[in-house]
Amino acid sequence: NNNNNNNNNNNNNNNRKNEEEFFEFFFYLSQLNQILFTHIPIEQLINNSNSNLNSNSNSINTNNYITSDNRTHICCLFLKSYDTINQFVTYLQFITLIINNSIDFNTNWISKIIFRPPKLVGHRGSGSERAATAGNFRRTHFRENTLLSFYNAALCGAEFVEFDVHITKDNVPVIYHDFVIKTDNQLHVSIASLTENQFKTLSEISQQRIQRLNESTCDFNLKKRTHNYFLNDFAPTLKECFELLSITIGFNIEIKYPTKAQLNDLNFQVKCLNDYVDCVLKIVFKYTNQNRPIMFSSFDPDVCLMLNFKQSRYPVLQLTGETKSPNLQSQTLIDAIEFAKSAKLAGIVSNSKLVLSNLEDVNYAKQNNLIVCTWGALNNDPQSVEYQFNHQVDTIILDHIKFVKKALDIK
């Protein structure tokens, strides 16, 4: 009947109007460097797209969209375009990340700090165990990611030390590089399946397969020293790092979170991302001195998003240059830069090979006020380090701190 026809016409008009707003919204998003991050649920994002558009700004006002269940929904839009037989095709992919704002820091000094990027950062402290030599230069080596290694890095001139953080079964953040601990009988045990005490015991046992540097095995002739000889120390917890290391030593805290492929390959499980990140932040804000400089980093873009939304005091940087990562942000320099820019991160940490072959991307990052840090074997070459500093790289993460510092006379 006429009434039904009128209702149908009205519905069609409303649908057409919503559709027009919807595609107008997508067109707007396509101008925002391919990726947009907002605080609001995807349903509200679409339903309220027209009212939130602002042609004079590269962001959408989201102040009024905080969910009642004390969670922040992050809606990510990825645009993928390519040509197929003279036909231009665009795929729109929504990814929703739910961030839980449940942390109570119980402190009155949580405010954003003015961060000055350090020049030199000690890689896993005094350097990776695989990097005991640089050309003809050899050094006394310390077991990586230990308090002894961190102290030595500071003595050699590093302003910060970089270390890797995992969460144990009983919610304790511990310092270790790999997701699993390997023993001398080739047993592989995931850190996520161990308690703190089990981790301490097993990480010590794992070092028994490497000959320790002691009175009976020590050879002080550097020409004969190999990477199998080093000064040993125990694997610490994050809490112990805060309690036992001088507040003058800055921390570059890299949070390791496995990809789905790594979970399948190594056959272990980890806590959900919210709980994982919360475990780290609770220790940081409970035990740190407000004068200690800190920066966060991760290869996982979701970890970076969570760190940036859950706290605003310390800078968060996206790690990139990992070719096996499923995330583009962790593979290529330009994708990491676009991600950091759109997500309002402090900057990026890239493999130095990518930086040296894409200096125009470094210029683009600096134009957008992003911190640029690098890691990789090339950072143990003083000429490479000097070249990077001359091309706007802020921070070098390296193994041979004293060697490079002395060669370049870095103050």
Image: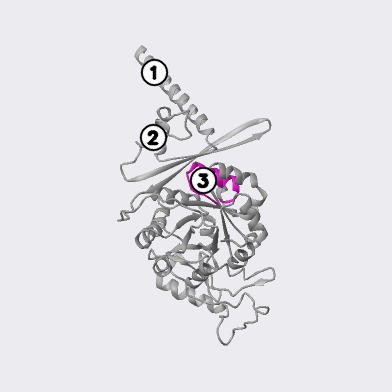
Closer-to-camera residue (86/257)? 257
Give the residue number, with chain letter if any, for mark 2: 44
Considering only vertical position in the picture, is 43 above or below 214? above
Q: Secondary structure at mark 1?
A: helix
The residue to which callout 3 is attached is 340
Is 307 part of what is drawn in magenta?
no
Of the two numbered discs 1 and 3 in the rendering, the one whose residue sits closer to the viewer? 3
Q: Split into 4 quadrants, where in the image is the C terminus?
A: bottom right
Disc 3 packing (10 Å; few <14; some 14–19; many ≥20): many
SS assignment at label 3: helix
Q: Amino acid at mark 3?
A: Ala
Looking at the picture, how far across and down is residue 367, in whole percent? 56, 41
Other-residue count near label 1 (Cα within 10 Å), few / some / many at <14 / 14–19 / ≥20: few
- State the residue at coordinates (48%, 57%): 257
Q: Earlier in the sequence, mark 1 or mark 3?
A: 1
Residues at marks 1 and 3, CA–CA distance in whole angstroms? 44 Å
The residues colored magenta run 330-348
